[in-house]
Image (spheres, rainbow, N blue to C red):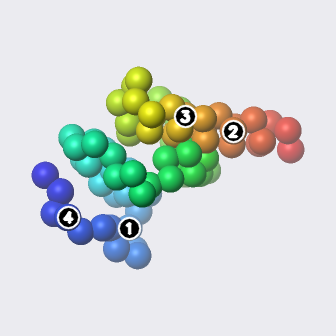
């Protein structure tokens, strides 16, 4: 169960990810930019299958779309 606090400024990426994964026992916060989280995931060493959202949900679709966009842009460079 989450404490209701957001991770602090010194939080690590894995700490942030575990915070969001733990949050997935409840519907995602609609204020999160799921596409942006997915877009920056490859740069943090995450794989596409590390998406913290349940498959078949809109947040999952947005996260993977952002991830795929980032991967395509890296290949073009």
Marks 2/1: CA–CA distance: 26 Å
User: Callout 4 environment at 10 Å: few (<14), some (14 to 19), or many (20+)?
Assistant: few
Residue at the farthest top position: 56
Q: Would residue 13 be seen by someone viewing this image from the given angle?
A: yes
Residue underneath mark 3: 64
Q: Residue at x 40, y 25 (%)?
A: 55
Residue at the farthest bottom position: 9
User: Callout 2 environment at 10 Å: few (<14), some (14 to 19), or many (20+)?
Assistant: some
Marks 3/1: CA–CA distance: 23 Å
Q: Nearer the N terminus, badge 4 or badge 2?
A: 4
Q: Nearer the N terminus, badge 1 or badge 4?
A: 4
Q: Secondary structure at mark 4?
A: loop
Q: Residue at x 22, y 43 (%)?
A: 26
Residue underneath mark 2: 69
- Between disc 2 and disc 1, the foreground one is 2
Q: Which mark is residue 4?
A: 4
Q: Residue at x 61, y 47 (%)?
A: 39
């Amino acid at each position: 169960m989450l404490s209701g606090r957001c991770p602090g400024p010194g939080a690590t990426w894995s700490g942030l990810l575990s915070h969001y994964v733990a949050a997935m026992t409840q519907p995602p916060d609609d204020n999160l930019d799921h596409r942006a989280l997915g877009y920056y995931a490859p740069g943090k060493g995450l794989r596409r299958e590390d998406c913290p959202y349940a498959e078949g949900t809109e947040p999952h679709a947005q996260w993977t779309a952002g991830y795929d966009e980032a991967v395509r842009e890296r290949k073009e460079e």
